[in-house]
Amino acid sequence: MLLFALQAFPQIPPGYYDSANGKTGVALQAALHNIIKGHTVISYAGLWTAYYTTDDKPNGKVWDMYSDVPDGTPNGNPPYTFTFGTDQCGNYSNEGDCYNREHSWPKSWFNDTPPMNSDIFHIYPTDGKVNGMRDNYPYGTVSSPSWTSLNGSKLGPCTWPGYTATVFEPIDTYKGDLSRGYFYMSTRYYTEDAGWAGSPATTGSQLKPWALQMMLHWASVDPVSQKEIDRNNTVYGMQHNRNPFIDHPEYAYLIWGTPTATGDPGSASPQLAVYPNPAADHCTVILPADLGNGILNPVVVSVTGMRYSPGFKREGNLLDLNIQSLAGGVYVLVLTGESAVYKTKLVKE
């Protein structure tokens, strides 16, 4: 335990992502794979001990994304909590009996082989009963659930376009967490997936189109949280690799493109991808190809019609906006391209 505690707080090493700079698409995915491959393997049994520091809530309880109800949400008290060690599964019959180890990317999809079967970046402590109900179903969206957990996770027919069979839908608060874990799996095991069984959502280590679009959308509506940042830093102290999509959320869109329905769904104009959103001091804009290389004049418009010209820095097809001087609230970001005007909603925290 002392070893894990001493390793719990590493940050991104200087130059860690240098070899990925300026790349997009498959070239970027390959570069990131080379950065994070060959990690130090934690044994499957060792995950129990790792969870004490990777998945602990501020109150010291187990942070279970299948049972947690975050503070500030309706009915914000979780229906039950788990104590490390004491409530470790074990046998279960009902929710709240115990927690076990959930392969968010089900192990049957990769034939339960190492090192994937103990890679903590996709294995979380979760309630045994909910884990069992999720089984090896893909994640998806559900409007008519056949079963609902006490925190609101759902099992039922998929409503996301492209798939209609049974899926498991976690609560909104953790959809981004799980999507970035999937992007990690697709990149860590890129070209290392020979013989993987696959699934309705995956071909080898790569997501099928319907699942990829959903995961990109989930990542855009649930930005990186402090929970993910802390977990990424702690896991780095153990496995000696990182989840690049937590450190750089924009990498997902540079590899696979922007999700459908990003931005303001009510707008008829072409839309932009902005991350994080809401943002505090800075945000990153993925620039459309037809903007060209001309002079950019991004404009931010308030709900009362006031126009602001934020400071910005462009690197390739990425635009870093400095929004420190904006008051908190909802704005429209406008960029004018050679053939279209792009707009999206921007929320300043």
Image: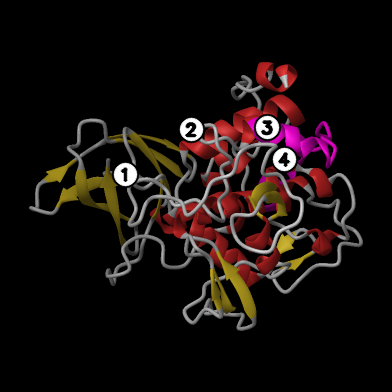
Horizontal arrangement in the rendering, residue 249 relative to residue 165 (left or right): left
Instruction: Give the vertical position of 120 relative to 78 (above or below).
Output: above
**Label 1, label 3: how many angstroms apart (C-alpha)?**
39 Å
Q: State which tag comes first along the sequence, 4 or 3.
A: 4
Say whether residue 40 is magenta: yes
Question: Could you tell me residue 209's position as x and y percent?
Answer: 63, 70
**Residue 258 visible here:** no
Label 4: how many Cα within 10 Å (few below 14, some 14–19, many 20+): some
Say whether residue 331 is magenta: no
Q: Nearer the viewer, mark 2 or mark 1?
A: 2
What is the quadrant of residue 32 in the picture?
top right
Question: Could you tell me residue 70's position as x and y percent?
Answer: 42, 48
Read off the residue under disc 2: 59
Q: State which tag comes first along the sequence, 1 or 3.
A: 3
Magenta span main SS: helix
Instruction: Give the vertical position of 40 relative to 105 (above or below).
Output: above
The boundaries of the magenta stretch are 26-52
Read off the residue under disc 1: 296
Which amino acid does the dot numbered 2 rest on? Answer: Asn
Q: Which of 16 and 6 lies nearest the eye of the viewer? A: 6
**Label 2, label 1: how many angstroms apart (C-alpha)?**
47 Å
Q: Nearer the viewer, mark 4 or mark 3?
A: 3
Which amino acid does the dot numbered 4 rest on? Answer: Ala
Which amino acid does the dot numbered 1 rest on? Answer: Leu
Residue at the spot 45% in from the left edge and 53% down from the top edge:
173
Q: State which tag comes first along the sequence, 1 or 4.
A: 4
Read off the residue under disc 3: 235
Read off the residue under disc 4: 31
Which amino acid does the dot numbered 3 rest on? Answer: Val
Residue at the spot 27% in from the left edge and 48% down from the top edge:
347
Mark 1 and 3 residues: CB-CB less than 8 Å, in contact? no
Q: Which of 137 and 304 lies nearest the eye of the viewer? A: 137
